[in-house]
Amino acid sequence: MMYAAGDAETALVEAFQETSVLNRTRDDPWLVVFSLRRQIRLLDLRGSWSTRAGASMALSAAHEPKATQSWAQAIYAEYGHLQGLVYPSAMRGRPSGPVPAGVNRELFCQNVALFERARLSLPTRPRLHLPLGHPGLAGMLGGVAREYGYAMI
């Protein structure tokens, strides 16, 4: 599995949710932005599918890895034509402001879990690949930290 977000702010809020500390150096974190080389098929967990399948919308936001991983494994086995899942960010919500330039409107504030079936759709080179310690990211990272009440080190 590869976990990604539709925009940088969502990725950061999700990645640092456990500590609420945006640590720019611990474990050498990087911001990577990429575009897929081709369209992929995702199961959309943002609508009624979860409820119809016997779960609920909580499936997208559950902090119970065993439960969500079991569901993902069952989906993987049952839907061999899918390359992954799209689901709302439990940490970010849906800001009322405009979608930032260059961000796919459908994926703004959303998360994507890609199965290995999507590997051929991944690019050979990302559009952006910078360590979070890069000076050029300091302003953006500081803004995210302030917005969500995270500390930044």
Image (tube, grey):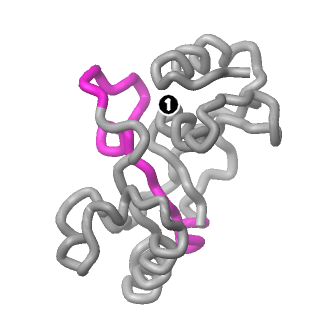
Q: Position of residue 28 (x, y in %)?
A: 81, 38
- In the picture, measured across the screen, residue 60 lies left or right of residue 17, that is left
Image quarter in which the C terminus is found: top right
| Residue receiving disc 1 | 9
Give percent across and percent down for residue 114: 52, 63
Q: Residue at x 59, y 71 (%)?
A: 116
For the N terminus, give its image quadrant. bottom right
Q: Is residue 53 magenta?
A: no
Does residue 132 lie above or below 125 as drawn? Answer: above
**Image: magenta residue range:** 95-119
Structural crowding at the residue carrying mark 1, measured as other residues with C-alpha within 10 Å and reported as few (<14), some (14–19) or many (≥20): some
In reply to whether residue 115 is colored magenta, the answer given is: yes
- Report the residue at 39% width, 47% height from top: 90
Name the element at disc 1.
helix
Task: Please give the count of numbered marks on the rendered protein.
Answer: 1
Above or below, comparing residue 116 to residue 22 in the picture: below
Comparing 68 with 64, the one in front is 64
**54 sits to left or right of 28:** left
Q: Position of residue 89 (x, y in %)?
A: 40, 46
Coordinates of residue 150 in the picture (x, y in percent): 57, 25
Q: Residue at x 75, y 14 (%)?
A: 135
Q: Which amino acid type is marked by label 1?
A: Glu
Given residues 127 and 87, the one toward you in this image is: 87
Image-based side of 109 in relation to 153, left or right:
left
